[in-house]
Amino acid sequence: MGYWFGFAVFLYLACAVLLIAEIFVPSGGLISFCALLCLGIGIAVFFRQGTTVGWVGVGVAVVMIPLVLVIAYKVFPRTRFGRSVTLAPPEREPGDAVPDSGRLREMLGAVGVVLTPLRPVGMCDFSGQRVECVAEGGYVEKGRQVRVIEVQSSQLTVRIVEES
């Protein structure tokens, strides 16, 4: 029982390592296939030891796979090694283009100036606050005045203010 049992445990560990590798190495699913192959062979070896041992092996696999994925996605990026091999999210600076949604709702009806041409998306300035906006009617050239007519989530829809 010792050698075959150890071999099955080794296959389970290989499956866990391959699942973690699949997350960080683009392989088109080849690494996942190898991980599932190790798992399948490991289960078969466990069942060869006995029905009870086989079902315990299946239970361990059912717990192990989600646990390995949670560790890979949640815990690994917070480790020293994980921080060195993963990209940091972009840091937003004050005055960046996406303010919080509560402030966006207050901008309904506000008048601003187009900073970059809206084709139909571009930047507008509303009292010193730069915001990404979508033009209602397509292209709007730089320097035109626009009014916020709709706020959806983090998107402002603007319309050209007709000069009278």
Image (cartoon, rainbow, N blue to C red):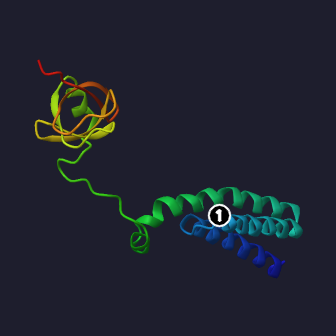
- Quarter the N terminus occupies: bottom right
- Quadrant of the rendered image containing residue 127: top left
Which residue ends up furthest to the top in the rendered image?
164
Q: Residues within 10 Å of mark 1 (few under 14, many from 20)?
A: few
Is residue 164 depicted above or below 79 in this figure? above
Residue beneath the point at 62% across and 65% down: 19
- Quarter the C terminus occupies: top left
The amino acid type of the residue labelled 1 equals: Gly
The foreground one among 133 and 151 is 133
The foreground one among 58 and 15 is 15
The image shows residue 52 at horizontal and vertical percentages of: 84, 61
Count of numbered badges drawn on the protein: 1
Residue beneath the point at 73% across and 73% down: 11
Q: Which residue is mark 1?
A: 28
The foreground one among 18 and 109 is 109
* 60 to the left or right of 142: right
Is residue 9 depicted above or below 126 in this figure? below
The image shows residue 155 at horizontal and vertical percentages of: 32, 34
Residue beneath the point at 17% across and 26% down: 110
The image shows residue 44 at horizontal and vertical percentages of: 84, 66
SS for callout 1: loop
Which residue ends up furthest to the bottom in the rendered image?
3
- Quadrant of the rendered image containing residue 26: bottom right
The foreground one among 111 and 10 is 111
* 22 to the left or right of 6: left
- Quadrant of the rendered image containing residue 60: bottom right
Is residue 135 depicted above or below 4 in this figure? above
Residue beneath the point at 32% across and 58% down: 90
